[in-house]
């Protein structure tokens, strides 16, 4: 099938990016989103944005199943420990998390764990056998990825985690969020078990650390990094809106209404990459990570000229 994919790319080198199938590795479905976006509407919006497959994080976790169970196999859920506002800052010291995670993975409903936030100033110092370590070990036991959002001014914490848990597949949400490309590279070079996601790395989020210029073209350092590690990056929308709070519990989140705009932005810089790299970063890497048995979901469709 790989040969067939390459054949497609040779035949339609110019037009392929406009129709590039994408895998959205970072979708949230929160109770505050379901208030304004029904599962049916969410699936319609995914279709409108031409998202082939996706990964959904529910808050609480079970919310995601309302989407995945209606998606005809196009979506998978990963398990989030978050149940109420502020849990992003509490999960790492909540002793119930590991037991709940084990039950969730054993249910067969979830294809991973996350999104887990470790944010400077909030995350507890790591200690042997802490909740983070136990979740890493559990993910390795079930051979599922962990979506981890770190936000520290240095890469040390992430490097320590990924070297300590070499058997755990880590998906690094937002590729370090606030780290420069060189620091991201130091983690990728140290840890084969890390792939980096570029969800929310758009003109509206993490605005002080852009990956593109004002024209939407990848900055040279990021372009070089993606070309050096074409198997280690993936893209998502992270449909959370408005952006001024990490998680809002007092009003509806209209992120799904922004989904198409986020993907238009990402398709813009993806289109500027060599087609074989774009297909991997836009779709194949995420599909291989989260839905290894889904088959050829990333083959570009035939286009009539
Ligand atoms: Zn995040």
Image (tube, rainbow, N blue to C red):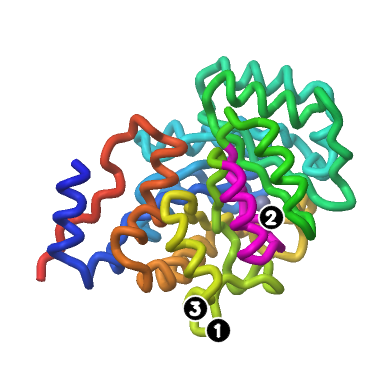
Q: Position of residue 169 (x, y in %)?
A: 56, 35
Give me the C-alpha separation between circle 1 and circle 2. Answer: 30 Å
**Relative vertical location of residue 29 with respect to residue 73 in this rendering, above or below:** below
Q: Residue at x 24, y 50 (%)?
A: 299
Q: Which is more N-terminal, label 2 or label 1?
A: 1
Q: Residues within 10 Å of mark 3 (few under 14, many from 20)?
A: some
Q: Residue at x 75, y 65 (%)?
A: 244
Q: Residue at x 35, y 57 (%)?
A: 50
Write down the quadrant of residue 54 in the picture. Answer: top left
SS of the residue under disc 1: loop
Marks 2/3 in contact by CB < 8 Å: the verdict is no
Nearest to the observer: residue 182 or residue 13: 182
Q: Note whether residue 53 is visible.
A: yes
Nearest to the observer: residue 4 or residue 103: 4
Secondary structure predominantly adopted by residues drawn in magenta: helix
Q: Which region shows up in magenta?
A: 170-191
Q: Which is more N-terminal, label 3 or label 2?
A: 3
The residue identified by callout 1 is 214
Q: From the Cβ of disc 2, is ligand 1 less than 8 Å away?
A: no
Q: Position of residue 66 (x, y in %)?
A: 51, 34
Marks 3/1 in contact by CB < 8 Å: the verdict is yes
Specify the label residue 184 is tagged with: none
Quadrant containing the N terminus in the rendered view = top left
Specify the label residue 252 is tagged with: 2
Give me the C-alpha separation between circle 2 and circle 3. Answer: 29 Å
Give me the C-alpha separation between circle 3 and circle 1. Answer: 5 Å
The residue identified by callout 3 is 216
């Amino acid at each position: 099938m790989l040969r067939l994919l390459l054949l497609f790319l040779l035949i339609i080198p110019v037009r392929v990016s406009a129709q590039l199938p994408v895998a959205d590795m970072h979708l949230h479905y929160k109770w505050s989103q379901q208030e304004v976006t029904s599962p049916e509407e969410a699936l319609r919006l995914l279709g409108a944005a031409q998202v082939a497959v996706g990964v959904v994080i529910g808050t609480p976790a079970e919310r995601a199943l309302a989407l995945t169970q209606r998606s005809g196999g196009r979506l998978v859920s990963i398990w989030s420990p978050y149940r109420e506002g502020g849990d992003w800052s509490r999960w790492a010291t909540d002793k119930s998390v590991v037991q709940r995670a084990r039950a969730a993975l054993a249910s067969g409903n979830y294809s991973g764990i996350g999104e887990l936030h470790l944010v400077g100033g909030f995350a507890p110092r790591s200690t042997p056998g802490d909740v983070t370590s136990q979740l890493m070990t559990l993910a390795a036991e079930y051979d599922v990825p962990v979506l981890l959002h770190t936000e520290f001014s240095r890469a040390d914490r992430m490097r320590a985690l990924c070297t300590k848990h070499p058997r755990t597949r880590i998906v690094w949400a937002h590729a370090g969020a606030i780290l420069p490309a060189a620091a991201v590279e130091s983690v990728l070079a140290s840890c084969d078990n890390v792939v980096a996601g570029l969800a929310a790395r758009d003109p509206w989020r993490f605005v002080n650390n852009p990956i593109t210029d004002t024209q939407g073209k990848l900055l040279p350092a990021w372009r070089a990094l993606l070309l050096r590690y074409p198997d280690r990056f993936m893209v998502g929308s992270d449909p959370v809106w408005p952006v001024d709070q990490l998680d809002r519990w007092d009003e509806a989140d209209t992120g799904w209404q922004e989904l198409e705009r986020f993907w238009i932005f990402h398709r813009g810089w993806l289109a500027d990459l060599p087609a074989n790299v774009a297909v991997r970063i836009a779709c194949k890497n995420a599909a291989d990570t989260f839905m290894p048995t889904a088959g050829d979901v990333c083959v570009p469709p035939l286009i009539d000229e």
